[in-house]
Image (spheres, rainbow, N blue to C red):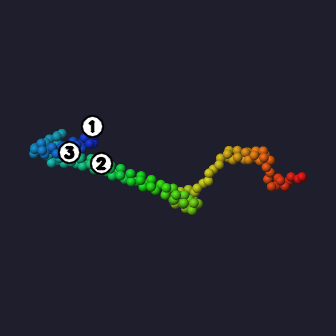
Amino acid sequence: MDARSKRARVLRLRAYIAAIPKRLGGVPLTIGSKDYTLNELGQVFQEELDAILALDAASAAKEKAVLAERTVKARNRALHRTFKRFLQAVFNDDVTLADFLLKPVEGPRTKLETKVVAIQKAKATREARHTLGKKQKKKIRG
């Protein structure tokens, strides 16, 4: 286990808190040019341990909340999609749909090149089959 890991720090802090009153007696200590009583030293380590444990609890709560949000989102996905389609079918004006932050449904846009090719194919087909319209048939005599 890495000595810098959170788990190692928690174990070390718990050991400090347990061993200070047991092993150091009632003698005040000077550590880093500061005097500490045993209670003060224990409180410093306990405060750090409490902060780590609070962070772990908050992280677990966050993970639980994220999982709950994802579950609800997945469950409601079809409802959102259907409701959006319903609104777009019922209200086809920009103003009303803007209240729902939606836009009207636009039909598929056919590119100009596609239309030109389709018209050319239709003309070629009519010519190949000798197809005539009503007015063209009326003009034929004989």
- Kindly identify which numbered label has been placed on residue 14: 3
Instruction: Tell whether label 2 touches label 3 (CB within 8 Å).
Output: no
Q: Report whether residue 65 is seen.
A: yes
Give me the C-alpha separation between circle 3 and circle 2: 16 Å
Give me the C-alpha separation between circle 3 and circle 1: 17 Å
Where in the figure is residue 83, as x and y percent of width and height? Answer: 51, 59
Where in the figure is residue 24, as x and y percent of width and height? Answer: 12, 42
Give me the C-alpha separation between circle 1 and circle 2: 18 Å
Amino acid under disc 1: Asp
Of mark 1 and mark 2, the one earlier in the sequence is 1
Amino acid under disc 2: Asp
Is 34 located above or below residue 67 in the figure?
above
Where in the figure is residue 139, as x and y percent of width and height? Answer: 85, 53
The structure residue drawn at horizontal position 24% and vertical position 49%, both measured from the top left corner, is 50
For label 2, the SS is: helix
Q: Which residue is mark 1?
A: 2
Classify 10 Å Cα crowding around label 2: few (below 14), some (14-19), many (20 and above).
Answer: few
Q: In which quadrant will I find the N terminus?
A: top left
